[in-house]
Amino acid sequence: MCIIICLCQIIALFITWGGAISLLPVAANIASTIAGYTHNGRKVRIAGMLINSPLWIIYDVIIGSWAGIADEVVSEISMLISIKRYGWKNLDKVEE
């Protein structure tokens, strides 16, 4: 299913192409999708904090979306809280 979702995102990229800026949200979503399918909290947070949110913040700055920037800042804070709450090592457990 992960491959199908990623392919759908790539198809959407071609359909809605608006230049190189279109790559940012698609790359962010693909990274997040792949990380989510690992069922590993640590990988989900690494992808979110280092790939997904930064790419969305860059995109939001370019298009001038203050709400988008705020959303991603809150997401980053939420991920930091979860790391603090559960501990970095505990996030490495794979949920089944």
Image (cartoon, grey):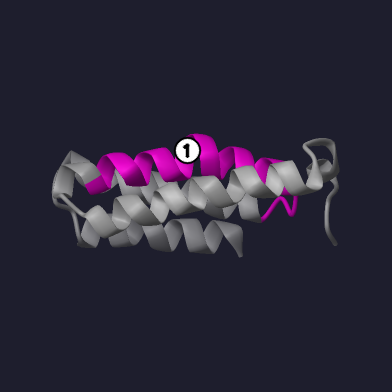
How far from the left and from the top, in percent, is residue 52? 46, 44
| Residue drawn at x 80%, y 40% as measured from the top left | 87
For label 1, the residue is: 51
Q: Is residue 3 left or right of residue 20?
A: right
Q: Secondary structure at mark 1?
A: helix
| Residue drawn at x 46%, y 53% as measured from the top left | 74
How far from the left and from the top, in percent, is residue 56? 35, 47
Q: Is residue 39 left or right of residue 89?
A: left
Is residue 70 rendered magenta in the image?
no
Image quadrant of residue 66? Answer: bottom left
Q: Is residue 44 left or right of residue 93?
A: left
User: Which is nearer the eye, 9 or 29?
Assistant: 29
What residue span does the magenta drawing correspond to?
37-60
How far from the left and from the top, in percent, is residue 90? 85, 43
In the image, residue 96 above or below residue 25? below
| Residue type, label 1 | Ile
Quadrant in which the N terminus appears: bottom right
| Residue drawn at x 61%, y 42% as measured from the top left | 80
How far from the left and from the top, in percent, is residue 38? 71, 50
Magenta span: predominant SS is helix
